[in-house]
Image (tube, helix red, strand yellow):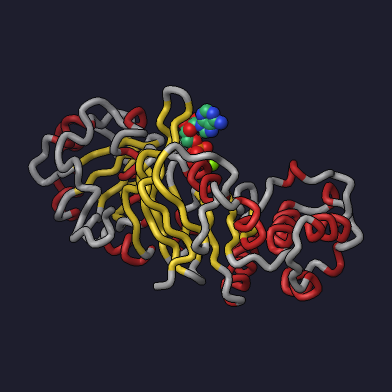
Amino acid sequence: MTAAIVVKDLRKRYKDREAVRGVSFEVAQGEIFGIVGPNGAGKTTTLEMMEGLRRRDGGSVQVLGMDPAREPYRVRERIGVQFQMTAIQEKMRVDEALALFASFYRRRGDVAKLIAMLGLQPYLGQSFKNLSGGWQQRVSLALAAVHDPEIIFLDEPSTGLDPAARRELWEMIRGLREQGKTIVLTTHYMEEAEQLCDRVAMFREGEVALLDQPKRLVARMAGWDYIDFVSDDASLADIERLPCVQRAVETDGCIRVHGDDVQQVALAVLVLADSRGWRIRNLRFAAGTLDDLFVLLAGGEASGEARREGSAAKGEGSVAMGEGSGVV
Ligand SMILES: Nc1ncnc2c1ncn2[C@@H]1O[C@H](COP(=O)(O)OP(=O)(O)O)[C@@H](O)[C@H]1O
Ligand SMILES: [Mg+2]
């Protein structure tokens, strides 16, 4: 793989808080690379250090062979950064914004082609504030790409978009990749990571916890079957004491129980419920998804408050399931 970006042991401290704690990864040329992780995991800080917009405290970053801290202007000519819409004047028209952003760079892209690709033609004369969220997002993508950059950075590009607009955005991003561009994006939608990204780095507390292709991350969840149910009176601690149960977690009023043999688990839970007089509703069987992997990973430390006392007594550390080729 030809690396567009090489990050090694990257570190950033804000006063007493270590936001990025020794992050390393490479982004291949022409791939869509996703960074996922809970709020505060260090995604934006990492992105900004790659973009040369934030000073790092340690480690190294190479973007297209250059260090963005040493050659910020040369790097900026060749990368595109999607800005939040708040950075653009409300009343500015789409065509004006495109012209303004293009004027920031020496390098000129084929703006007409970009407009055609993103379907912006009918909106050129409109001001931002009159555009829907989806179209604003397209315009901000166009603004990030006016100078035909080789790498485009997108920080949570689909936040706030409805599912249809999100899918359209994915198409745009895939279109940019087809033109040979490298895309680095952050997201907290696991479905987005799964559908869109070639590889995904899962961040947790300033570190890369897992890094792999989405389908291989999902494959780690093979065998990670569970049952879900709702109950007002079930005791999580009692359920966890059942020999066939590996782990029981409660999230948003829903109890999720894992074990090697979910049928056994379901049976044992129902028998226990019957003997204790618990009411169990909405019982269903489910298989592990990327979402589950994410929750497991985040729950390793971060979301302990989402669990009842006594949970996760068994099988902890089982996040790195399967053989860990992608564990970094
Ligand atoms: N400018 C800043 N000053 C102090 N702390 C910050 C600053 N920016 C981010 N942080 C802190 O650093 C941590 C990582 O933040 P961030 O990189 O924004 O994470 P993410 O994008 O994954 O949500 C968080 O705890 C956040 O509060
Ligand atoms: Mg962020």
Q: Pick whichever, 178 or 231, lies toward us.
A: 178
Q: Quadrant of residue 144?
A: bottom right
Seen at 43% across and 39% down, the residue is: 41
**Vertical position of residue 17 compared to residue 159: above or below:** above
Seen from the viewer's position, the closer of residues 265 and 11 is: 11
Q: Give the quadrant of ligand 2.
A: top right
Of residues 254 and 223, the one drawn nearer to the viewer in this rendering: 223
Single out the residue that lies furthest toward the top.
Answer: 16
Tell me residue 209's x, y (percent): 32, 48
Quadrant the N terminus occupies: bottom left
Residue 215 drawn at (x, y percent): 35, 66
Residue 190 quadrant? bottom left
Q: Is residue 195 visible?
A: no
Q: Is residue 85 left or right of residue 272?
A: right
Name the spot of residue 35 as percent of width and height, x first: 46, 52
Q: Residue at x 16, y 44 (%)?
A: 246
The answer, for residue 103, to whether it is visible in the render is yes
Quadrant of the image occupied by residue 173: bottom right
